[in-house]
Image: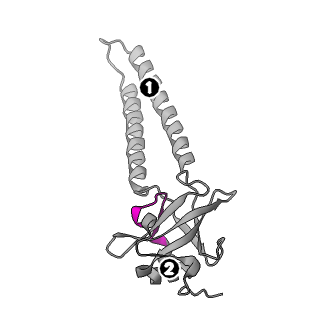
């Protein structure tokens, strides 16, 4: 996405530069007291409309972009982590580094983000996808964990992985380590 934005920025910069040069030539060719030919007027109007269209299109694309810059969860792999914990595969992101601690949130039906677990970045693959091993999960949200293990597309789309550690995660309030959790069953 950053590459697209960079390319679009360079293209828009080039177009705006050419428009500026064209307008400077037009002004230079027509003396202040001279009359402007209709052809030059139409060229200026067309170029201005193109620039306005590019600005509107750029604004539209920016508004359509995601409201957050957190990477999406692409899939989950049950019992694949260092301690046989579930692993989430995320899109690439500059926000995460190897070994980073993360907090996992689930967006419920009322669009409220619920803190459901924590983990750490176990590795960043060569294709820049991020592997997050889930290490703790809130007792109250075991059904969500089960659906994560089952790789439910609906639940994976509602997970947010944030590169922060909350005070609840640090104190362990309401969380259970998955190393000792017999409740999570996997289907092979």
Residue 130 appears anywhere in the view: no
Q: Is residue 70 above or below residue 42?
A: below
Q: Which residue is drawn at 48% across and 37% down?
A: 12
Q: Is residue 11 magenta?
A: no
Residue 9 at x, y percent in the picture: 50, 39
Residue at the spot of label 1: 20
The magenta stretch is: 157-168
Q: Name the element at disc 1.
A: helix
- For the residues labelled 1 and 2, the Cα–Cα distance comes to 57 Å
Of circles 1 and 2, which is in front? 2
The reply to whether dot 1 and dot 2 touch (C-beta < 8 Å) is: no
Residue 88 at x, y percent in the picture: 58, 69
Residue at the spot of label 2: 145
Classify mark 2: residues with Cα within 10 Å, few (<14), some (14-19) or many (20+). many
| Camera-nearest residue between 65 and 163 | 163
Q: Does the magenta stretch include residue 166?
A: yes
Q: How is the image coloured?
A: one colour
């Amino acid at each position: 996405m950053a590459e697209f934005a960079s390319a679009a920025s360079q293209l828009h910069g080039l177009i705006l530069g050419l428009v500026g040069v064209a307008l400077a030539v037009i002004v230079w060719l027509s003396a202040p007291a001279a009359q402007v030919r209709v052809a030059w007027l139409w060229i200026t109007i067309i170029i201005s409309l193109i620039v306005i269209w590019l600005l509107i299109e750029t604004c539209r694309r920016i508004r359509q972009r995601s409201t957050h810059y957190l990477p999406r969860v692409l899939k989950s792999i049950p019992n694949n982590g260092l301690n046989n914990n579930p692993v989430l595969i995320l899109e690439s992101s500059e926000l995460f580094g190897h070994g980073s601690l993360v907090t996992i949130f689930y967006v419920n039906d009322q669009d409220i983000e619920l803190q459901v677990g924590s983990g750490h970045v176990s590795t960043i693959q060569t294709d820049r996808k991020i592997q997050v091993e889930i290490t703790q999960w809130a007792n109250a949200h075991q059904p969500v964990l089960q659906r994560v293990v089952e790789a439910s597309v609906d639940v994976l789309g509602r997970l947010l992985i944030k590169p922060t550690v909350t005070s609840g995660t640090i104190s362990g309030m309401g969380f259970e380590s998955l190393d000792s959790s017999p409740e999570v069953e996997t289907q092979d």
